[in-house]
Image (cartoon, rainbow, N blue to C red):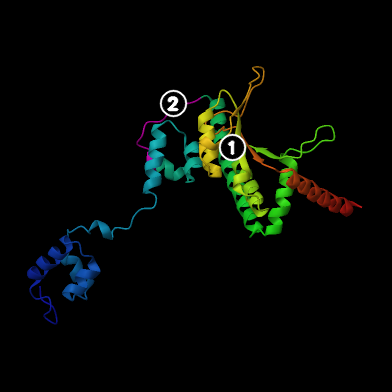
């Protein structure tokens, strides 16, 4: 092979070098630059019959979809179900699975139920995503909590969940009961803001007999940061056999009872704080 400038006179020797570079994994551009070849026709002849290395092949974005479609078809799925599941066209699905055996025909009513269930599952997934977005946005709106924010929140929380004094039964005690660990943590933070020393706190678990009592005590002890041996005797709640309980399973840990010793003065303050808040709210309604 002769070239006008004599650069490709020894074609066979040049081809041997080009093939060796190709088999070493070089691309066409790399070979062209390495051998100083500026003629694509010559380069094509030099590399004739030599396949390109795998890394130069552009990946097919639909390969994964194709394999999944074939897998679902082998499970007996219809084109409609595969389309809803993968979000691709029926024409593509038809090309991908045409060599596979057709699934047995289902009862039309059964097909309709399956399609409806799939649509409902898709709708639920969308709703859950929207629900989580709303919650995340709301959490961002809270920002940093000030001491006054925590003070007001703790007062309202205690008046909702804590024990209260009654004219017919004097109970000027600070006693708080709840089953939500996040509420317990907030309550403890509030007590800390009020300057209540942790040494004044005592803990007790209230739980149904059928639950994992020891596991519940360990859980609450870890949450509040004390040794389980420091907990007071657990209060066991008797189960009414006529009642269907929903608070069961591994996540059921009963309620934690937190008592502040010598809390009469603190209780009076809480009641006074609440009265002040209630009076302010009442004035806004006038």
User: Percent x, y for residue 236?
Assistant: 61, 25
Farthest top residue? 241
User: Percent x, y for residue 68?
Assistant: 40, 41
**198 sits left or right of 147 in the view:** left
For the point 36% across and 34% down, which residue is it?
100
Pointer 2 residue:
104
For the point 32% across and 58% down, which residue is it?
58
**91 sits left or right of 208 in the view:** left
Image quadrant where residue 162 sits: top right
Label 2 crowd (10 A; few <14 / some 14-19 / many >=20): few
User: What's the magenta region?
Assistant: 96-106
> In which quadrant is the N terminus drawn?
bottom left
Farthest bottom residue? 5
Q: Secondary structure at mark 2?
A: loop
Return the residue nearer the eye: 48 or 53.
53
**For the residues bearing labels 2 and 1, Cβ distance under 8 angstroms:** no
Magenta residue check for 180: no
| Image disc number at residue 120 | 1
Image quadrant where residue 210 sits: top right
Image quadrant where residue 233 sits: top right
């Amino acid at each position: 092979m002769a070239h006008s400038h004599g650069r490709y006179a020894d074609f066979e020797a040049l081809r041997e070098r080009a093939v060796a570079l190709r088999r070493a994994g070089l691309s066409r551009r790399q070979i062209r630059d390495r051998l100083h070849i500026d003629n694509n026709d010559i380069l094509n002849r030099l590399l004739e019959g030599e396949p390109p290395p795998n890394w130069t092949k552009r990946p097919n974005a639909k390969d994964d979809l194709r394999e999944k479609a074939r897998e679902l078809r082998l499970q007996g799925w219809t084109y409609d179900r595969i389309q809803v599941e993968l979000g691709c066209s029926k024409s593509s699905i038809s090309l991908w699975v045409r060599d596979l055996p057709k699934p047995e025909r289902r009862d039309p009513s059964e097909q309709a139920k399956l399609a409806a269930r799939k649509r409902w599952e898709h709708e639920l997934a969308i709703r859950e995503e929207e629900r989580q977005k709303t919650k995340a946005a709301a959490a961002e709106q809270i920002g940093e909590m000030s001491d006054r924010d925590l003070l007001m929140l703790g007062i309202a929380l205690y008046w909702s969940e804590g024990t209260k004094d009654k004219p017919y039964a004097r109970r000027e005690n600070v006693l708080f009961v709840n089953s939500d660990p996040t509420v317990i943590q907030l309550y403890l933070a509030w007590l800390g803001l009020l300057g209540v020393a942790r040494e004044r706190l005592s803990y007790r678990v209230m739980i149904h007999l059928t639950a994992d009592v020891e596991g519940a005590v360990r859980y609450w002890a870890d949450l509040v940061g004390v040794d389980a041996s420091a907990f007071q005797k657990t209060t066991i709640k008797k189960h009414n056999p006529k009642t269907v309980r929903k608070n069961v399973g591994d996540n059921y840990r009963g309620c934690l009872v937190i008592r502040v010793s010598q809390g009469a003065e603190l209780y009076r303050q809480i009641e006074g704080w609440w009265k002040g808040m209630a009076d302010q709210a009442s004035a806004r309604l006038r």
